[in-house]
Amino acid sequence: MARTEEDLLAELNADLREGVDWKQGAVTYLREIVRSGGPTAERYHLIKPFVGGPDYAPFWVDVFQFLDVVQTADLAPGDVVIDVGCGPGWTVQWLARLGHEVIGLDISAELLEVAETRMQNDPYPPYVEKGFAYDLREHDIEASPLGLDRKARLALFESTLHHFFNPVAALRNTLADLADDGIVAVIEAAAPPKGSEWDLQNIEIMQTYDTIERPYTRAQLLDMLELAGLPYVAFLRPVNGLVPQSVDGLSPMLWELTRADNINIFVASPTAAGLERVDLPVRTVESFRTGWTVVEGVSHRETREDGTAYRWAGPRVLVRLDGPGPHEIAVATIGLDPGQVQRVRVVAGGKVAGSVTLTESRGRATLELAGRPGQIVELQSDRVFSPGWHGEDDPRLLSFTLDEPG
Ligand SMILES: C[S@@+](CC[C@H](N)C(=O)[O-])C[C@H]1O[C@@H](n2cnc3c(N)ncnc32)[C@H](O)[C@@H]1O
């Protein structure tokens, strides 16, 4: 179960300086950044996401992540999209260019002016017979919903959720204008380790501009979503770029993909229908809290007659802990003879963190897993079997089955 909203906000805002008007900081941000950064800062907001070189990294990140999310949202022409905290409006422009009806809301009138300038200077709407369908509204989403006539298919939070003093209120108010099978999509960084360079950089920005820069941990996000009424969620990672057709291309990518909690890109929905509509696995916030995901070392998923699911596992399986836990994994041997024993160990951070002993007569047991969300733990078996169930061409060395929830 989630903490109370009050407890969550107390944790999220514990390190924020007292007596600061954070909303006013957001309203005057553009003025302040132009004052300190000059015309370059203003121009950046007009041309975003484009950047002059030599460092193109922010461009690739912004564009690919945004396009991946929009592709996933699987929108139809004319679908309503709420762009929450649209700022200078590059996402409004791209969504409108795709033929969607975009409601861009922001607390800063000055940033909305930049967005309007951008739209006014774009001569080419997608359809010859009508102009861009967009509406820019000065609105504090933490305070109230928009109250739209047509409900939205997508509510996008592009680099915005971590700016809110009360992100639960922002999500809840957005949800009020979302269709039943609509989705909320969030794209932003995850909380950096305390004291890291990036953490210190965020603290400096907060001091300079009185705007909030405090990304969230996975555990905080799970509570936030549940409290806001978004119990279904899929955490995602982008995969972009050309990859060599060899282990050099794929292995590093797999490694990167399995580390899920160092980036906060996710789609959440009020009903299972939202995730189903966009073909994402339907999992609840609660299942992430105590859940885990196998990332290496198993065969495909199979279902028993009673509907429970399991996988065949080799001698070394990597499992990612999805939430703060506690977590449990049920394992069962697949081929012990009487008198034989099999040990399955959990190794976390290079240390043995638990083990079970299986025998022919006691072939099933449950392992307790502890650790932080996102941590990869390893299950190791001291026995392998070569069942060759699929004939001579089945090279698998299998050790045990593991029950998979959901
Ligand atoms: C980092 S900017 C992101 C802007 C835009 N999505 C983009 O990617 O360029 C965060 C935005 O959230 C807006 N914002 C902050 N608090 C808000 C609130 N309570 N209601 C609406 N917008 C808010 C800020 O004014 C700012 O434009």
Image (cartoon, rainbow, N blue to C red):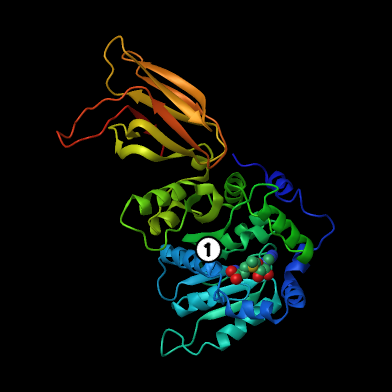
Within the image, what quadrant is residue 314 found in? top left
In the image: residue 248, left or right of residue 114: left
- The residue furthest left is 392
Rate crowding at label 1 as few (under 14), some (14 to 19) or many (20 or more) other CA atoms within 10 Å.
many
Say if 118 sits above or below 211 in the image. Answer: below
**Depth check, front residue: 98 or 207:** 207
**Depth check, front residue: 227 or 211:** 211
**Depth check, front residue: 375 or 23:** 375
Q: Which residue is mark 1?
A: 178
How many dots with numbers?
A: 1
Residue at the image position 48 percent from the left and 29 percent from the top: 347
Residue at the image position 52 percent from the left and 60 percent from the top: 184
Give, as a three-letter code, the residue at label 1: Leu
Secondary structure under the numbered disc 1 in the rendered image: strand
Say if 198 sits above or below 361 in the image. Answer: below
In the image: residue 215, left or right of residue 345: right
Q: Residue 353, position in %: x, y? A: 52, 25
For the C terminus, the image quarter is top left
Residue at the image position 74 percent from the left and 56 percent from the top: 203
Say if 169 sits above or below 310 in the image. Answer: below
Res. 250 in view: yes
- The residue furthest right is 19
Q: Residue 242, position in %: x, y? A: 37, 63
For the N terminus, the image quarter is top right
Q: Residue 84, position in %: x, y? A: 60, 67
Say if 251 sits above or below 157 in the image. Answer: above
Within the image, what quadrant is residue 26 found in? bottom right
